[in-house]
Amino acid sequence: MKIDYKGQAVLGDELEMTTWIDKAEGVRTRRNTEIRDGNSEKIIVSAKTMWCLIDGHSKRPKRFTAEFI
């Protein structure tokens, strides 16, 4: 996981969050997230995280379906 703090927000600020998947391989995906100031649209936080889907019954990693992605 990588998180870059590029600014700050305070109580009462209006924020917008966008998230998207840019890479999916087998059981893992890389998800990107940006949090922006709702007024200036300046990026406050950007993050990249790796996700792994776990089957609820077997508790083992499971491939992401095209529908999920």
Image: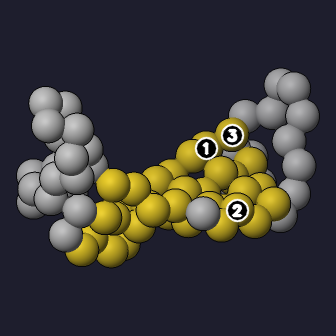
Crowd class of label 3 (few under 14; some 14 to 19; many from 20; radius 10 Å)? some
Q: Secondary structure at mark 1?
A: strand
Provide residue 37's location: percent of width, then percent of height.
Answer: 74, 48
Q: Could one spot residue 56 in this view of the protein?
A: yes
Q: Residue furthest top?
A: 12
Q: CA distance from mark 2 to mark 1?
A: 17 Å
Instruction: Quickly name the residue at label 1.
Output: 16
The quadrant of the rendering that contains the C terminus is bottom left
Q: Which mark is residue 63?
A: none
50 above or below 17?
Answer: below
The quadrant of the rendering that contains the N terminus is bottom right
Instruction: Quickly name the residue at label 3.
Output: 15
Residue 61 placement, left or right of 8: left
Instruction: Quickly name the residue at label 2.
Output: 3
Q: Residue at x 65, y 67 (%)?
A: 2
Residue 46 placement, left or right of 10: left
Q: Nearer the viewer, residue 39 or 32?
A: 32
Q: Which picture quadrant has residue 31?
A: bottom left
Q: Are marks 2 and 3 in contact (CB under 8 Å)?
A: no
- Three-letter code, disc 1: Glu
Q: Are marks 3 and 1 in contact (CB under 8 Å)?
A: yes
Q: Residue at x 9, y 60 (%)?
A: 66
- Three-letter code, disc 3: Leu
Q: Are marks 2 and 1 in contact (CB under 8 Å)?
A: no
Q: Secondary structure at mark 2?
A: strand
Q: Residue at x 57, y 46 (%)?
A: 17
Q: CA distance from mark 2 to mark 3?
A: 17 Å
Provide residue 58's location: percent of width, then percent of height.
Answer: 14, 37
Q: Secondary structure at mark 3?
A: strand
- Colour pattern: secondary structure
Q: Nearer the viewer, residue 24 or 43?
A: 24
Tell me how many marks there are. Answer: 3
